[in-house]
Image: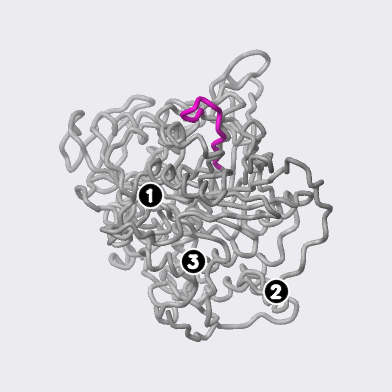
């Protein structure tokens, strides 16, 4: 691909310019300051290896906000309460992740950092506006060694994924379609190994990226096999996976074991973008057991286990016993679990949530005589990426640079409103902004895929973070103009839209979950709904539910669109986990922006979709 020079906007000056130069030198694989000398362990028969891992970063360079930037760390039972409440902590941000990883490596001369996919895709504006090039540079700067690909690495097709790995620029115009490749004229690609063992060009056995890599640290050889889930084509747009075949994960990895062993590599780790979901946690207070939402370190040691239907379990149970450890992802969940291999031995399986909020610190003993990992030595723990450490200066410089460059995209006017459109709910829980977002999701063509067109949209009110204000003018735009930045502030989490099949009975159960289960003691969580769908309720009793004026039928299947947070059972809406024919579309912000453009000037309608009896 050709390299091109594009004007990059205002330049940083002084100390910021020096910091950026140093940051890009590291990120682009140039000279970096040598690490301080550390004493090597004795040249004995065994060596302690450190493996640091994370997954599902999704381009979250800046510290994520809202629920995307928090994790449950504990529980408490307030005085007089009958149900415990979650204790959360704000975590994440690549500036802090890089610092935590650097601190964790101290005293560990045999250390590798790996990831299990979805480093990019479904990213915030700061990264997505530049085809996720900033995130690849950030991964280079934090010294990532190896990563598997995930399904979101295919959002823009496999050639774009290869460009992420190899470097080069694409001629997309200077900021056209909210994206601008190579604003500084070059992009070096990943300095780490991107692996895709089970993705081949259709009709061939030719992988689009390497299937494995062997890392040799002072004579210690460890093989890494990297894969995405075989069902990637069902959750990525058809254009993103055109011309590709996705092979079975177990068969692919097991076939590579003898290939590695022929090279004298007996220590093998699988990085796989597929995962599990922890069940509810049993939490004790004054000797009484309570069922609570799992904390980040609950599974599988502190009162929670993986749901037995988790897709990672049959994979882990059938991978060759020669594979010593599995680093997983995709479900955005935290867990550290032993799952028995086909020989009946425990094998560690880990996942570090998402968005850079956690990393997993694993220690393994390598036996030089067998050139293999001592399975019983493997110990893993998920570590919070707290924000009470110094920010990594290289990451800070990358972020500051791209924040300056993104201004033209952020200030673009995408539509108009005739007055304020707010998230203020009426007595029944409906809001004008909730109606707008639900309608935008229902109208988004990216969620259709191979299935029926959705007829209902459901949006969580907690995902609506700001109002659209008529007189707002951050960039000097006229009253009523809505900029892309304003729209993004309303929906800042970069969730992706998901369409799925639910029966009428399941939809009614979802509606009752607004005030039952974990939501019973925390106030109502009234889902915002699209035009044509309506229901009534009284207290905690659901009344009539209709679609286009006709009663919803319990046994009929309806196509529903929502965001990935709700589709994953977020906010206590566990019925979503029983959905069928799940299909992943584009980002919610893109649907929102497109709808505003097509319906300007937008005027809210009457709030009559949700009513109280």
In the drawing, what numbered circle is on residue 469?
Answer: none
In the figure, residue 307 lies in which quadrant? top left
Q: Position of residue 191 (x, y in %)?
A: 58, 66
Q: Nearer the viewer, residue 343 or 389?
A: 343
Question: Dot 3 corresponds to which residue?
Answer: 165
**Label whose residue precedes the other's in the sequence (3 or 2):** 2
| Residue stretch rendered in magenta on the structure | 340-351
Disc 1 versus disc 3: nearer the observer: 3
Q: Is residue 272 left or right of residue 38?
A: left
In the drawing, what numbered circle is on residue 31?
Answer: 2
Question: Dot 1 corresponds to which residue?
Answer: 434
Q: Quadrant of the C terminus?
A: top left
- What residue is shown at x 35% (from left), y 44% (from top)? 248
Crowding around mark 1 (Cα neighbors within 10 Å: few <14, some 14 to 19, many 20+) is: many
Q: Position of residue 372 (x, y in %)?
A: 62, 41
Disc 2 versus disc 1: nearer the observer: 2
- Circles 1 and 3: CB atoms closer than 8 Å: no
Q: CA separation, marks 3 and 2?
A: 20 Å
- What residue is shown at x 64% (from left), y 64% (from top)? 141
- Circles 3 and 2: CB atoms closer than 8 Å: no
Q: Nearer the viewer, residue 507 or 129?
A: 129
Q: CA separation, marks 1 and 3?
A: 39 Å
């Amino acid at each position: 691909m050709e390299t091109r020079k594009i004007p990059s906007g205002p330049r940083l000056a002084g100390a910021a310019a020096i910091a950026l130069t140093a940051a890009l030198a590291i990120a682009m694989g140039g000279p970096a300051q040598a690490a301080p000398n550390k004493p090597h362990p004795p040249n004995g028969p065994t060596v302690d290896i450190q493996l640091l891992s994370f997954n599902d970063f999704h381009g979250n360079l800046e510290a994520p906000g809202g629920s995307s930037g928090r994790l449950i760390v504990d529980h408490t039972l307030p005085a007089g309460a009958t149900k415990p409440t979650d204790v959360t902590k704000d975590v994440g941000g690549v500036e802090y992740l890089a610092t935590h990883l650097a601190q964790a490596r101290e005293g560990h001369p045999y250390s590798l950092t790996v990831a299990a996919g979805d480093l990019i895709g479904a990213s915030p504006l700061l990264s997505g506006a530049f085809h996720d090039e900033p995130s690849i540079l950030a991964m280079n700067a934090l010294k990532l060694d190896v990563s598997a690909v995930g399904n979101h690495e295919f959002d823009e097709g496999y050639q774009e994924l290869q460009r992420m790995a190899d470097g080069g620029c694409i001629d997309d115009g200077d900021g056209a379609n909210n994206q601008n490749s190579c604003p500084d004229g070059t992009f070096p690609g990943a300095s780490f190994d991107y692996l895709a063992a089970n993705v081949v060009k259709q009709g061939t056995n030719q992988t689009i990226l390497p299937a494995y890599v062997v890392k040799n640290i002072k004579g210690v050889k460890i093989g890494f096999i990297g894969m995405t889930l075989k069902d990637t084509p069902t959750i990525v747009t058809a254009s993103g996976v055109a011309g590709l075949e996705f092979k079975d994960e177990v068969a692919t990895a097991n076939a590579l074991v003898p290939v590695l062993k022929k090279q004298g590599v007996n220590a093998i780790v699988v990085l796989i973008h597929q995962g599990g979901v922890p069940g509810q946690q049993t939490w004790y207070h004054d000797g009484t057991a309570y069922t609570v939402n799992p904390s980040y370190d609950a599974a599988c040691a502190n009162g929670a286990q993986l749901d037995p239907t988790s897709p990672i379990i049959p994979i882990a149970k059938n991978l060759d016993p020669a594979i010593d450890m599995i680093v997983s992802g995709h479900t955005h969940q935290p867990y550290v679990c032993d799952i028995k291999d086909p020989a009946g031995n425990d094998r560690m399986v880990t996942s570090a949530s998402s968005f850079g909020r956690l990393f997993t610190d694993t220690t393994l003993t390598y036996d030089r005589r067998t050139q293999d990992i001592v399975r019983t030595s493997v110990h893993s723990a998920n570590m919070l990426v707290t924000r009470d450490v110094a920010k990594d200066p290289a990451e800070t410089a990358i972020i500051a640079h791209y924040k300056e460059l993104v201004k033209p995209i952020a200030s673009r006017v995408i539509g108009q409103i005739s007055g304020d459109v707010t998230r203020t709910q009426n007595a029944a829980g409906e809001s004008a902004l909730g109606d707008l977002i639900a309608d935008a999701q229902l109208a988004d063509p990216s969620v259709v895929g191979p299935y029926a067109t959705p007829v209902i949209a459901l949006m969580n009110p907690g995902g609506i973070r700001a109002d659209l204000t008529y007189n707002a003018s951050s960039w000097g735009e006229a009253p009523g103009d809505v900029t892309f930045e304003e729209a993004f502030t309303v929906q800042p989490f970069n969730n992706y839209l998901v369409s799925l099949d639910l029966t009428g009975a399941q939809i009614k159960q979802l509606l009752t979950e607004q005030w039952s289960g974990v939501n019973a003691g925390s106030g109502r969580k009234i889902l915002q709904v699209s035009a044509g769908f309506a229901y009534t309720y009284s207290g905690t009793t659901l009344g009539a539910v209709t679609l286009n004026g006709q009663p919803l039928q319990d046994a009929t299947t309806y196509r529903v669109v929502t965001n990935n947070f709700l589709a994953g059972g977020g906010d206590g809406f566990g019925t979503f986990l029983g959905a069928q024919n799940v299909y992943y579309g584009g980002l919610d912000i893109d649907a929102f922006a497109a709808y505003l453009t097509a319906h300007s000037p937008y005027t809210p309608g009457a709030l009559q979709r949700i009513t109280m009896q």
